[in-house]
Structures are given as structure tokens and as C-alpha cells.
Image (cartoon, helix red, strand yellow):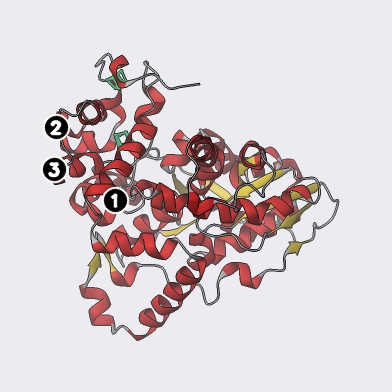
Amino acid sequence: MTAPPIQNCGKCGLCLSVCPVYQVLKQEQASPRARLQLIKAFEKKDLDASPLLKDLVSQCLMCGACKVVCPSGINHYGKFMDMREQLARSLPEPPAIRSLVYLLAKEYRLRMGAGLARFGQRLTPKFLADKYRIGNIPVHRFPTMNAAPFRQTLPDVIPARGIRRGRVIYFVGCATQYLFGDTGQATVDILSHLGYEVVVPKGLTCCGIPMMFHGARDRAALNMAANLTAMADAFDNGPCDAVIVDCTTCGAALKDEYPGLMDTLNRRPDPALSGRLDILPPDIHTRIAGKTRDILSFVHEHQTHLEMRPDLSPNKVIYHAPCHTRNSFNTAGTVTDLLATLPCFDYIPVRDTAACCGGGGTFFYEYPEIAAKMMAGKLCHARDADAQYWLTDCPVCRINLHGSLSEQDRLTVVHPVTLISRGLDA
Ligand code: SF4
Ligand code: SF4
């Protein structure tokens, strides 16, 4: 179904009430409805591409909250993505963003980049790591790269333990692959414990969403082709109960963006993809999209099969709900229900659980002052809760939350699966 045009905006202002950028800046030009009007003016050729226009359009976390509340059904997310693509053609991204897109476009570049980063982390003297920041985050508070790319540490198929209940494909995104192997190992352990055979396809790469956010949808399409090719065999070589993601942003790529991208490519074929998509089963992207599940709602659905250690001491935890968990998967309530139910958690609800942290892919780097203001209230509530763990199911939120805490804070930031897997009865 085609989304309603921007002309349908009734200027009701509901999107302003949920937009984290508007909530910080309190300026109409920073609101979702103003961005739509700028895009409308650009489409009508009343406005040219300019650095100011690009800045106003980019000053957005792509959180999707405006789309969810809009009574006119406007697809802000899609409009912003299209606009970013058009602007990127005439106004190049800054060098750091271009380098990131370049790295994410090929798995071997990512692997080399991660290896160099790990080497650099070991060699950087502490006084330098303390002194420099990337966006808001002191260099020394960035996560240590995995000792080895996570998928390399796994067999292609991890057998189910106990009663076999089915078979799942695990889409391991680039953050788990290179930064947060603990999340990946916990995800595999839980799925296997639940009785699922876990297939980790060879040849996966970055889902491509960071590239789409920076207007490089053509390059993201190449990543999509690599991922669909990697998953197609596994998907059709046996029953598949779910395609599991541990990051809801990767999940949004598989579930929402790939079908949209495939529709566009069917209408406007890209020569760079010739011979890559036409060899795939024609409906593979929609079948994968239909099976995509985030690990926490999968665990919620199967929690009666979780066998937890009887001597468990619950961990005092608070939760930060990432944008894609709230606005794409709509599962933040399911996650908090899981945290309130499982015996490994003593869940403390805090204010601002669902407020954006300002991570937003590279937003914390591009707009550190705005991101810091978003984080300020969250930090106060988090500290007041006196918890041991701050849980979140997005790797960028995890980097941003941990990076915003100080050495004095006792909070450890992890994905909820880490504590669930530690609590499993062996
Ligand atoms: S919520 Fe929708 S209709 Fe209301 S101002 Fe925002 S874009 Fe316009
Ligand atoms: S996607 Fe999020 S940050 Fe961007 S305009 Fe909408 S509500 Fe604001």
C-alpha cells in the first residue's frame, strides 16, 4: 500500500510530542513536520540542496517514533530515507561517515578495520585514550573489539540440547561479530537450551541500515544481496521456525527495509546487482521478513521451556528500550514483561526507559551536544535506581550508555541475554 503524501499532514503536532530531537531543541525547524515540509519544498523544486537543508534533515535519529503516532499515516521514515539519498548525491557526507560506509560495504574491510582497531586499542596509551572523545564518548570507554570475529568461533550448525523443538537461523550482525561476542554466545546458548538447532549462515555481513541512513541505499543493496544469498540456502535446506536477530535494528533491515528495497529494485534494476538477486528464489526476502524475530520476544514466547538454576540470586536491573524495539518491533512491553518474570532479574522500572538515548547509529558522533542532553535525564534516573545492570538490546545504545557512564558508576551495560544465559541450568 502506498503511504499517504506529505500534503496529508494536518499539522496536528502529535509527532512533536514524541520526537527526541524536538524535545531537546524546542524549535519548529527541528520537528518531524518541519522536516516533511522541507522535503515537500525540495520535491517541488522550491528549495535547492544546501548544507543547511542537509543538516536539518540529518538532525534526526531515524527513530521512527513520528511515523508511529502520525494520524495521517505518513511514512516519515521512508521520506527521510529517500531525502537523505537524494542529498547525498550532491552533498557528500563528512570523511568519517564516508569511511564508515566504505568499511561496512565489504566484510573483508570490516574484518581488517576491526583487527586494526583492536591493535590500536592495545597500543593507545591510557592518557591519550582518556583525553580523546568520539562524539560524546571518551575513547577509553569504547568496547574492546572481540578477540576473533564471533562467527569464526562457531560451527555452522549448533545442535539443540534436550528435547528438539525446531530449527532457527541466527542473523549475526556486525556489532556482535566484531564488538559484542558475549551477546552472540548468550543468544546461541539460550536458543540451543530451548531445544532449537541454530544455523549461522556463512557469508553474512552488515545489514546495511547504517549505509541507508547516510543516503547510500545503493551500497546497502549490495549488502542485502550478500545477506539474502547467505541465508537463502539455510532457509530452504530445512524447516525454519524463525530468523533470529539480537539487534532490532538488524531486524528492521530484514523485516522492513529489504522488502522495500527489493520492490524499488524490481522497478528500477541496478546493474551493479545483475546476476546477484535474480539467482535467488524470487520471494526469499518476504519469507525471511515474515520469519524475523528478535531474540527477547522469542524467549518470552518460549520461557516455559527455560530451565533456570534453582540457586539463582536475581540481579537488580534497569532497562533502556531501543528505538527499533519500540517503533519497529513494538516489543518493549514484551521485554519488560520478560524482565519482570524471569528469576534472574530483579527488574526496577525507571522513568525514561523508553526515551531515546541519543545513540542513533552515528548521531552521538555527529550531534554530541543534542545527544548529551537526551542522555542527561536518563543518567539521573539510572543512577537513582541503584541497580547492578543497565540492560539494552541494541549495540549502539549499549556503546552510548556505557560511554556516558563514568568510572564511579557501578552499572554494567549488557544485553539481557547475557544474564539469562548465565542463569540457565546447565
Ligand atoms: S503527526 Fe503527522 S499529521 Fe500530525 S503534524 Fe506530524 S506529520 Fe503532520
Ligand atoms: S525519526 Fe525520530 S528523531 Fe527523526 S523526526 Fe521522527 S521522531 Fe524525530
Q: Which mark is residue 398?
A: none
Which residue position holds label 2?
27
Q: Give x and y (percent) for residue 222.
A: 50, 54
Q: Give x and y (percent) for residue 191.
A: 70, 53
- Sequence order check: which comes first, mark 3 or mark 1? 3
- Sequence order check: which comes first, mark 2 or mark 3? 2
Q: Quadrant of residue 19?
A: top left
Which residue position holds label 1?
363
Which residue position holds label 3?
52
Q: Amino acid at mark 2?
A: Gln
- Sequence order check: which comes first, mark 1 or mark 2? 2
Q: Can residue 311 be seen in the rendering of this structure?
A: no
At x 36%, y 51%, the residue is 361
**Of the residues tagged 3 and 1, which is closer to the observer?**
3
Q: Amino acid at mark 3?
A: Leu
Secondary structure state at the residue bearing disc 1: helix
At x 64%, y 54%, the residue is 229
Is the CB–ligand 2 distance for label 1 below 8 Å? no
Q: Is residue 50 left or right of residue 122?
A: left
